[in-house]
Image (cartoon, helix red, strand yellow):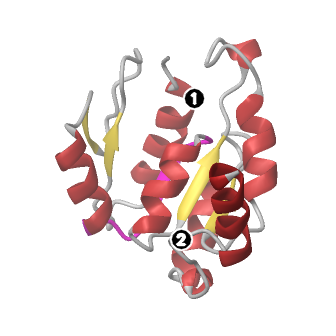
């Protein structure tokens, strides 16, 4: 589903920060950025390469975006889609970003007005909150799964 609100807010930030090279995957939205490079959709391999080369990722509040950024040790700004805006069918992303907001390397903008200062904050911290991210589940959790599967 389109997320023009995020793309428009990011494009406005790009207008005021032309010294940064900014790239967006905009999906099927109707807003076309004027101040940042963009494409409608990236292939999975292109997406991984783009995230790998990025300093920061800005995305909707989905878990896939979170995991992609964390796997590559990239700070991420999450902004939830809202059902009332027809950006999604439910408001589950609101709950997701509230849960993730204290995780290392995660920054949250609950609205398009909050996005610019959150981008500035994330860039100024330069990913310093990513030091403790672990790519695997904690051992006690894995043991419980193993016990469940074996019984």
Residue named by callout 2: 136
The relative height of residue 127 versus residue 19 in the rendered view (above or below) is below
Residue 34 x %, y %: 31, 35
Residue 70: % across, % down: 49, 66
Q: Which corner quadrant of the image does residue 96 belong to?
A: top right
Side of 124 relative to 71 (left or right):
right
| Residue 116 appearing in the image | yes
SS under mark 1: helix
Q: Secondary structure at mark 2?
A: loop
Task: Tell me residue 150's x, y (percent).
Answer: 63, 54
Q: CA distance from mark 1 to mark 2?
A: 33 Å
Residue 64 is covered by the magenta coloring: no
The reply to whether discs 1 and 2 touch (Cβ–Cβ < 8 Å) is no
Q: Which residue is mark 1?
A: 5
Q: Earlier in the sequence, mark 1 or mark 2?
A: 1
Q: Would residue 121 be found to the left or right of residue 21 on screen?
A: right
Instruction: State which region is magenta.
Output: 53-61
Tell me: 98 left or right of 64.
right
Residue at (19, 37) in percent of width and height: 43
């Amino acid at each position: 589903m389109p997320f023009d609100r995020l793309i428009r807010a990011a494009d406005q930030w790009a207008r005021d920060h032309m010294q940064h090279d900014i790239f967006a995957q905009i999906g099927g939205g109707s807003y076309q950025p004027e101040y940042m490079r963009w494409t409608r959709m990236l292939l999975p391999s292109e997406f991984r390469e783009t995230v790998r080369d990025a300093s920061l990722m800005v995305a909707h509040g989905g878990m896939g975006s979170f995991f992609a950024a964390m796997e590559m040790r990239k700070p991420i700004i999450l902004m939830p889609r809202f059902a009332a805006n027809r950006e999604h069918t439910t408001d589950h992303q609101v709950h997701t970003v509230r849960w993730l907001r204290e995780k290392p390397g995660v920054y949250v903008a609950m609205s398009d007005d909050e996005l610019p200062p959150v981008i500035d904050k994330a860039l100024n911290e330069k990913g310093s909150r990513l030091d403790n991210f672990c790519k695997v589940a904690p051992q006690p959790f894995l043991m419980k799964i193993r016990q469940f599967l074996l019984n």
